[in-house]
Structures are given as C-alpha cells and as structure tokens.
Amino acid sequence: MTRKAVVPTTGPKVAVVGAGSWGTTFGKILADGGASVVMWARRPELAAEITESKRNSRYLSGINLPRTMTATTDLAEALNGAEQIFLSVPSQSLRENLAAIRPLVEHTDVPLVSLMKGVEKSTGLRMSQVIEQVLECDPARIAVASGPNLALEIAREQPTAAVISSLSPETAEAVARRARNRYFRSFVNTDVIGTEFGGVLKNLIAVAIGIVDGVGYGENTKASIITRGLVEMTDFAVAQGAQPETLQGLAGLGDLIATCQSPLSRNNTAGRLLGQGYGYKEVVAQMQQTAEGLASVAPVLQLAKQVGVDMPIVQQVKMVLDGTMDPRDIAPHLTTDDDQPQGERTQNDQTGGGGALRRALQRAFDQFRHGGRGAAGDRP
Ligand SMILES: NC(=O)c1ccc[n+]([C@@H]2O[C@H](COP(=O)([O-])OP(=O)(O)OC[C@H]3O[C@@H](n4cnc5c(N)ncnc54)[C@H](O)[C@@H]3O)[C@@H](O)[C@H]2O)c1
Ligand SMILES: O=P(O)(O)OC[C@H](O)CO
C-alpha cells in the first residue's frame, strides 16, 4: 500500500519573536499543534535556515522543524495578522524589542505571551510588567508560559507539561489551546506573579546546585539546597503577592526539579563553572546561550529586601558571583547564619502568614539592640 504524502494544512498564523533555543522550540510546539508559525529572527542566515532547511543548527542541533514554520528578519511581516504573539528574547533585551513591536500591535487586541524567565535588572520588573509598561496595554491581553521546559527535550518531542497564566482566564485558555499537541500539554492559572517568579527563582537555585556540583559535593547537599530553595522561592513569591500553591506546581517545584537536575540547563551549567573556580566574567564569556539567573540575582535580592524576606541561598549565590565567597563554603551557610536551631518551615506558614513581617520586626529589634549596627545574622 502506498502512503500519501501529508500536505500541511494552513492553520491560524501565530508569531514568535526570538529564534533562540526556546523561541524555536515553542514555534515547533505551536506548529505541531496546528498553527502556521512565523518566527522573527535577528540574523538573516538563521531566518533563511529555518525557512529553507527547516533547521536551527546553532540552537537546536539535529532537530527537524515542521514545514508550517518559517522565519523572517522583518518584524512587521512576522507580526502582521498573527492571532497570538509569543516573546522569547533574553529578558534584558525585552524592553528594546518591545519599542519596535509597539507600533505594530497598538491598534490590535492580540494576546502577547511571555516565554521568558528573568526580571529586568535595572527595574526589578517581571517580563509581563515590562510588556504592560512599554506597550501600555490591557494586562488581560498578557499571558506568561512557564514550567519544566528544557527546550531540547521538548524539541525531541518528549512528553512535557507547562502552565499558561493570565489575569484573564479567557486569554490563558486561548493560549493554552494553541500551545498544545501530542507531546505538550498546557495547564492554565490566573496567578501571573507566582507563575513568573517560579521561573525566575528556580534559575537562581539551579545556579546554586551547579556551584555545588562544580565543587564536587554530592546528593545530600543538592537535595538540601533544592528543598530549602523551594522554601525561599515560596516565601519570596508569596510576599510579592503569589499564591503558595503555584510554587508547588509546574512553574515552581516542577521547573525547579528539571532545571536543577539537568545538564541541559544553562543556569546549572553557569553555576558548575563558578563552582569549578571560574570568575563571573569568564563564565559569561563561556556561555553560548542565555543564563537568565546571573542577571536576576541582584534585582531579586533587592525585591526580597523590600518585603523583608530572607533568601540565604540566593544571597550566597550572589556572594560567589561577586567573588566574596569561596564556592566551597556554600554548604555550611545552607539555610541560615543564625546560631539557634530553627523549625523546618517557610516564613509564610505556621506563623499565620505573618512570617515576613515578623522577620522585619525582629530585624528592626536586633538593630536597635546592636546600636544600629544590625544583628549578626544580617551580615554576610
Ligand atoms: N532554552 C530553554 O530551555 C528555555 C525554556 C523555557 C524558558 N526559556 C527562557 O526563554 C528566554 C529565551 O531563552 P533562549 O533559551 O531562547 O535563549 P537563547 O540564548 O537560546 O536564544 C536567545 C535568542 O535571542 C537572540 N537575542 C540576543 N540578544 C537579543 C536582542 N538584544 N534582541 C533580540 N534578540 C536577541 C539571540 O540571537 C537568540 O536567537 C529566556 O528568558 C529563557 O529563560 C528558555
Ligand atoms: O537552561 P535554563 O537553565 O535556562 O532552563 C531552561 C528552562 O527554563 C527549564 O524549564
């Protein structure tokens, strides 16, 4: 029996801005879900390779892309007529890219979906906040996608789940219906803060795991950091307005496990190099792809300070990045500098949700006791 060639049907057009590993993989997810995908790529040779060879050899070696995926360097050509627009450029470049996108979308109500997992270094804003600010658009149009989503595994069509979050359930559902196929399943929620911060914060814990890997510590150290890291993530996100259960879900625990375990993770890789003794600049020079965690450490700690949340693991990552702590010293500082034994709890539970406030008051009291010099536990 002869098999007929399957001619791709032309589904609704969607656009993906950014043709790195995640943008291209998400384009494949959407195309395999039935959409007709137009990618925007910065470099003409990459756009040509995607369109003509159905390959992105620099970012997704060995992966064949669907025939319903094309790419262009012309932003207007990519966005014009798109039913949904997905954004996947490095977080620190989003603002400049949105400036070019704005005139092309300001008279439409097309949903805009952030695929990114960083915060803006100069402002501390989440990516959905940057989108809302630059485009001055209704936040109900904005969605974010997050979860345990290592690009290469998904590009190889390994079964994976994600969560699509928007303040508008309708927007989240519309995006989730597009971002779904035989190997990729999208769940929905309306906790944008928790979903976005889950993706940001797991990167920082993955850098810590990479550091201990690089140093040569074993599974106990890593499991301790992952577990206490989830507590830090939850404390921080809840203090910012997230729902704690989001951090137990795909965008929190799920992504934490994937990123901390996988050698595919760029954040994990960056941490490993730090643990092996490379300095911050050398690590940045060696990284061929985006490791969002490196730029997010400082703004996250700044935000944590504003809401009185302690993040000892993230603080130690910063000290290693700054060169003020030997990576081998990360373990004894695992949970806290306090001399007193502590209960194994989050700052938000078992204290009636007042953990952050209680700590802020404790800090103020300690400062008073120490004549304005701060308590011993506040010092690095
Ligand atoms: N790769 C993954 O597994 C994965 C999974 C989920 C989320 N993410 C997130 O997706 C976002 C993009 O990451 P990625 O993995 O695709 O990174 P990447 O390094 O693979 O690709 C980044 C792309 O952005 C382009 N780029 C660089 N600077 C730019 C600029 N100033 N303006 C426009 N484009 C620019 C690069 O040329 C490249 O095409 C990050 O926030 C990352 O955290 C990545
Ligand atoms: O390679 P990383 O460290 O940016 O992680 C990729 C994804 O965020 C994993 O979900």
Image: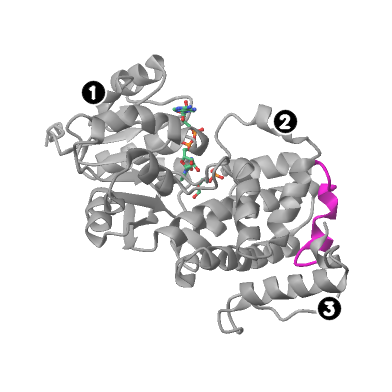
Q: Which of the two discs, 3 and 1, labels the residue nearer the N terminus?
A: 1
Q: What residue type is labelled 1?
A: Glu
Q: Which of the two discs, 3 and 2, labels the residue nearer the N terminus?
A: 2
- Which quadrant, please, contains the C terminus? bottom right
Describe residue 323's horizontal placement relative to residue 98 as left or right: right
Count of labels in the image? 3
Highlighted magenta segment, given as a residue range: 323-336
Q: Which mark is residue 77?
A: 1
How packed mark 3 is, by other alpha carbons closer than 10 Å (few <14, some 14-19, many 20 or more), is few
Describe residue 285's horizontal placement relative to residue 170 as left or right: right
Percent from the top left, x then y, of residue 297?
A: 64, 48
Q: Which of the two discs, 1 and 2, labels the residue nearer the N terminus?
A: 1
From the image, tell me which residue sits under label 2: 281
- Judge whether 119 appears above or below 17 on screen: below
- C-alpha distance separating marks 3 and 1: 61 Å
Residue toward you, 368 or 77: 368
Q: What element carries label 1?
A: helix
Describe residue 314's horizontal placement relative to residue 377 as left or right: left
Is ligand 2 closer than 8 angstroms to the Cβ of mark 3? no
Q: What element carries label 2?
A: helix
Q: Would you say the residues marked 1 and 2 are in contact, meaning their CB atoms lie under 8 Å apart?
A: no
Q: Which amino acid does label 3 sit on?
A: Gln
Residue toward you, 170 or 11: 170
